[in-house]
Amino acid sequence: AWKTTAATNSRFPSSVNFERDHLLGDGASQRRLGEPLDQKLTPSSACFSPTGDHKHVLACGYWDNSFKCFAFDTGRLVQSVFGHRAVVSCLARSEER
């Protein structure tokens, strides 16, 4: 299980941290999604959605009107999806095809 926290160095977070639950007993690990968030949006759980295999997380709320896919194990950006005319403020995904 992972918990999310927004950066606390300003009123508007510029990044989001993911931290593995220490109760899992496999060592604490923390990942930072370093892409800048839009300053007008307050991040919430609606901004994040893990993939079914828990290898990636989809995230939104970015200043460039994209949503992004990050690898959980490294925190690295895998893909950005552009095309929205405004900041994407929530997302959901499904395994249905």
Image (cartoon, rainbow, N blue to C red):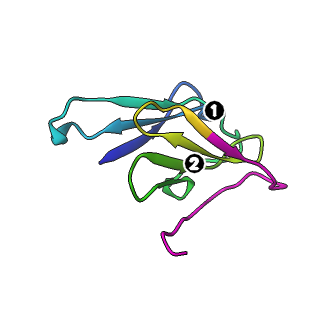
Q: Residue at x 60, y 61 (%)?
A: 91
Asked whether, in this view, residue 81 is left or right of residue 16, the answer is right
Q: Is residue 32 magenta?
A: no
In the visual, does 10 lie left or right of 65?
A: left
Q: Is residue 46 left or right of residue 3?
A: right
Identity of the residue drawn at 38% across and 51% down: 54
Question: Which residue: 57% across, 32% down?
Answer: 15
* Precedes in sequence: disc 1 or disc 2: 1
Q: Is residue 5 above or below residue 45?
A: above
Q: Is residue 76 above or below residue 94?
A: above
Which SS does the magenta portion mostly show?
loop
Judge whether residue 80 is colored magenta. yes
Q: Quarter-wise, where is residue 19 in the image?
A: top left
Q: Position of residue 68 (x, y in %)?
A: 63, 45
Say what secondary structure mark 2 lies in.
strand
Nearest to the observer: residue 27 or residue 55: 55
Q: Which mark is residue 59?
A: 2
Query: Considering the numbered disc 1 on the image, is that residue within a helix, a strand or a loop?
Result: loop
- Alpha-carbon distance for marks 1 and 2? 10 Å
Callout 2 crowding tier (Cα within 10 Å): few <14, some 14–19, many ≥20: many
Q: Are marks 1 and 2 in contact (CB under 8 Å)?
A: yes
Question: Magenta residues?
Answer: 79-97
Residue 90 is situated, as x and y percent measured from the top left of the image, at 61, 59
Residue annotated with mark 1: 35
Q: Amino acid at mark 1?
A: Glu
